Amino acid sequence: MRFASLGSGSEGNALLVEASEGASTTRILLDCGFSMREVERRLAARSIDVTSLDAIVITHEHADHVGSALSLTRKYRIPLIMSWGTGQAVKAHATLKAGDDDALVRWCRSDEPLAVGGIELHPYTVPHDAREPLQFVFSDGVRRLGVLTDAGCPTAHLIATLGGCDALVLECNHDREMLANSKYPASLKARIGGIYGHLANEAAAEILAAIDRAKLQRVICAHLSEQNNTPELAMAAMSAVIGTEATEILVATQAGGFDWLTC
């Protein structure tokens, strides 16, 4: 199984996950937080045609995650997977053409695994200010890729779910001191730093320290704030946990995400 980010941050998020078995390949796009043209361009940069996607999976309804997902589904008839609450928030039934929604939209629930081709998805709930937000663990039956962004605080459930992953995309949204000293209004600071907001570097490190890392090959710092964090601070927080363990630490950027990695 391999994965690549098309971009990660407050301006847009999309993660490509691929598994191959023999001549069969399954490709899933997790979140689609860019315009349709930009998604097509960024996929092409990874040598992927949008028509080869087997599904688009949406974590929640915020614009930097849902983006052009409904438009791509309508145009290319790519199945769309999301929670019922997310679907209601983005008005999926009303937006998709009458009669197509049942064929194109697949609902999912926390802790109810579902299969797309050769990939099994394990949705799990997270604390975030959205209607029914989910994050996901992907598995090809051998390897596990965990993804956690857009969560305000650690929970016992998400820590248990992410244990035993071979690779982890982990939100390191902000440095608490930088956020406190930023020019953001108090209300926005409270939202970002609250229990339904985004993970600070220290909170991400707490999660990393708590999970079972026996198989963890690499951790990718994701969804970094360009105003309230730096790659160096995020990596330092992860390094403080990893120590001498043989786990690679990388950073996903807003402009280019990261290139193909295996797990």
Image: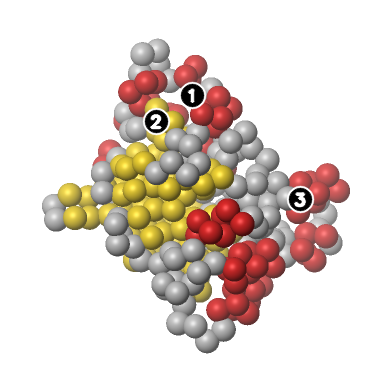
Give, as a three-letter code, the residue at label 2. Answer: Arg
For residue 125, above or below residue 218: above
Image spot of residue 28 (x, y percent): 35, 46
Residue 196, horizontal then vertical, whole percent: 70, 46
Disc with the residue nearer the chain's start (3 vs 1) = 1
How far across and how far down the image is residue 148, in percent? 54, 55
According to the picture, the residue beneath numbered tag 2 turns out to be 106
The residue located at (26%, 44%) in the rendering is 117
Q: Residue at x 47, y 19 (%)?
A: 93
Please give the residue where the numbered disc 3 appears in the rendered image.
194
Which amino acid, by three-letter code, is at mark 3? Gly
Q: Is residue 44 left or right of residue 60?
A: left
Q: Please name the amino acid that badge 1 sits on.
A: Ala
Q: Residue reaching furthest bottom? A: 244
Q: Secondary structure at mark 1?
A: helix
224 with respect to 179 (left or right): left
